[in-house]
Amino acid sequence: MDAALLALRDRLVDQGTAELSAPPATLKFTGEGTVDALINDIQTYPHAFVLAALVDRQVKAEIAWRLPGRVRDRLGTFEIDDLAKLDRSAWIKVLREPMALHLYPETMAGVLELGVRRIIDQYGGDASAIWSGNPSSKLVVNRFREFHGAGPKISTMAANILVRGFHVPMSDYRAIDISADVHVRRVMGRLGFVRQDPGLGEVVEAARTLNLDFPGVFDLSLWRIGRTVCHPANPRCSECVLNDLCTYARRSRGELTTVGAMADELKELAMMRDEGLITPEDYDAKKAEWLGRI
């Protein structure tokens, strides 16, 4: 790994570590005060956080995290025992227009119905039992994985928010992987940690290599960059806090040479070496210089 990538890693780890040590504050999931207050109340309504995390898929995050507030407004309650009275058809009615909470009400109704049932049956109606008692990060992630519809991304995202945002104590952070959504994958590729358009597994493994003790430590920083400036088309590199070290930005500014250009140059240099126009030592030195610029 070259010096720029090492510096990027260190900067991202520092940013994530700063989140862990920051004073507790109300997390802004939606920007709506009453809705965010409900989700932040993980002592009284821990299931609000769990259920919102379970539906955070295939829509903008703000839409998913509005769910607890909208359901409470419509039902007049968000007590777990009252939610347990809703069957699949009742959840579908809650999720349909005019609330427009989700594009797939039938699918999400099943996630919510089974999610509430699991909280009742497995945790006695207290979702905070998922993370209480200073558990290992692996145990917390696995408990989220047991919910219907919760894959690696949602499970690690939920655990990461608990640690980073709510300062929930866990005995370690090793099982909290990076949540490799489309934004995080794009930014990881452009920064140079992985190839462009990487798969989920490739990003997860790269993050583990970068910071084994807490692979998801820079998850939020990358997600924010992807959402705000590192767009699929016309990224606003000049506004990015990682602009000075990013492989994509440096290449755009002409500070780095493309692999294709380097290959052409090295081929020409090899011909000059073979014809005795430059020494093998000069060729090796030039090759090392070019490799250092990629």
Image (cartoon, grey):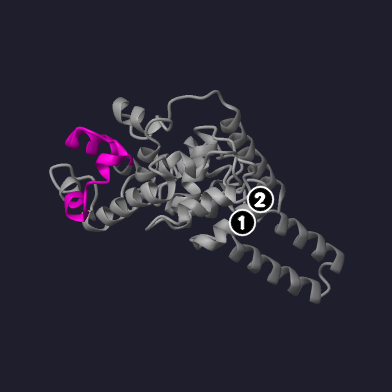
Q: Badge 2, how many Cα within 10 Å: few under 14, some, many 20+?
A: some
Give yes or no for contact between labels 2 and 1 (Cβ–Cβ under 8 Å). yes
Q: Secondary structure at mark 2?
A: helix
* Number of numbered callouts drawn: 2
Q: Position of residue 55 (x, y in %)?
A: 33, 49
Q: Secondary structure at mark 1?
A: helix
Between 193 and 99, the residue placed more toward the observer is: 99
Q: Is residue 217 above or below residue 193?
A: above
Q: Quadrant of the N terminus?
A: bottom right
User: Which residue corresponds to the image point at 76% horizontal and 71% vertical from the top-left?
Assistant: 272
Magenta stretch encompasses residue 236: no
User: Which residue corresponds to the image point at 42% horizontal and 42% vertical from the top-left?
Assistant: 127
Magenta range: 65-92
Using residue 74 as the reference point, say whether residue 162 is left or right of it: right
Q: Is residue 40 above or below residue 211?
A: above
Between 173 and 195, the residue placed more toward the observer is: 173
Residue 235 appears in the picture as rendered:
yes
User: Which residue corresponds to the image point at 48% horizontal and 44% vertical from the top-left?
Assistant: 130
Q: Position of residue 101 (x, y in %)?
A: 23, 45
Residue at numbered disc 1: 206
Question: Which amino acid type is shown beneath numbered disc 1?
Answer: Ala
Q: Quadrant of the C terminus?
A: bottom right
Magenta stretch encompasses residue 68: yes
Q: Position of residue 171 (x, y in %)?
A: 64, 42
- Determine which of the numbered discs, if any, sits on residue 210 in the image: 2
Q: Position of residue 89 (x, y in %)?
A: 17, 54
- Picture quarter containing residue 288? bottom right
Using residue 282 as the reference point, say whether residue 254 is left or right of it: left
Q: Main secondary structure of the magenta part?
A: helix
